[in-house]
Image (cartoon, rainbow, N blue to C red):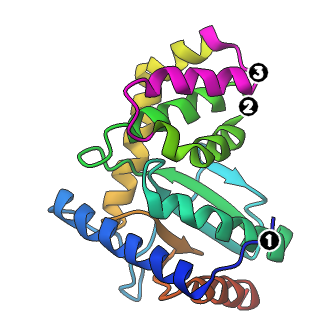
Amino acid sequence: MQFSYTQRGSGALWIVLLMVASVAALVLLTYRPSQNGSGTLSSAPVAESDHVKGSLAAPAVLVEYSDFQCPACAQFQPLIKQAQDEFGDKLSIVYRHFPLRTIHPNANLAAQASEAAHAQGKFWEMHDLIFAQQQTWATAQNARDLMIGYARQLKLDTQRFVTDMDADTTKARIDRDLASGVASGVSGTPSFYLNGAKLTPSSAEGFLNSIRAGVEQQ
């Protein structure tokens, strides 16, 4: 799928992103950011427990801290897909949970659903489906039932899915991602780190150009 931004669409994306980031900054009042030797904010090292698409041997590794209920995060998904299509095996994507629980009441449930799907080998399939259906479940009273419906759609074992979705280990996994984001200075979603360094693009094209630079510098 080729994604292109119109001038109006691009502007709307960045307005939404700035609004969400501003609210999130009020939610996370204090944090202790990790820094590399140059003083630049950096992400926690990628581990085996991370959700990774592509090879970690790729020249560019993009870490995303994201909230499934965040509108800006959903709008970034086609752009990330465009980057994957352009850079192929030169880029790997790492997804980490950063649910803004105070302002997005169903975000943590969606994260739990993705982890339950991961237990059956379909994290990325559930990731894509949850984002695609964001407007359906985001404020729904029956969001849990909708998540179970998505599990059926992906042909998962729904009984196991429900058990895994509610498991303490699942909740702890999400908490670990959240904690690593706070330690890395994340205050809003989506937040990106390219090859460990904080990425702060000012536009959609700037986002892609930063990744191109990350690939070329390696």
Does the image show residue 45?
no
Query: On the rendered image, what quadrant is the N terminus found in?
Result: bottom right
- Give the side of residue 132 with respect to residue 82, left or right: left
The reply to whether callout 1 and callout 2 are in contact (CB within 8 Å) is no
- The crowding category of the residue bearing disc 3, from other C-alpha atoms within 10 Å (few below 14, some 14 to 19, many at least 20), is few
Residue 79 in which image quadrant: bottom right
Q: Which marked residue is nearer to the observer: mark 1 or mark 2?
A: 1
SS at mark 3?
loop
Q: Which amino acid does label 3 sit on?
A: Lys
Where residue 44 appears, as percent x and y from the top left, is: 47, 61
Q: Name the residue under label 1.
A: 2
Where residue 33 appears, as percent x and y from the top left, is: 30, 69
Give the residues in magenta.
138-159
Where residue 69 appears, as percent x and y from the top left, is: 43, 48
Q: Which amino acid does label 2 sit on?
A: Gly
Q: Which marked residue is nearer to the observer: mark 3 or mark 1?
A: 1
The reply to whether callout 3 and callout 1 are in contact (CB within 8 Å) is no
Which comes before the other along the chain, label 1 or label 2?
Answer: 1
- Please name the residue shown 58% across and 41% down the image: 130
Does the image show residue 142?
yes
Q: Which mark is residue 121?
A: 2
- Please name the residue shown 73% across and 72% down the image: 3
Q: Which amino acid does label 1 sit on?
A: Gln
| Residue placed most toward the observer, 184 or 39 | 184
Q: Which mark is residue 155?
A: 3
- Please name the residue shown 52% across and 12% down the image: 163
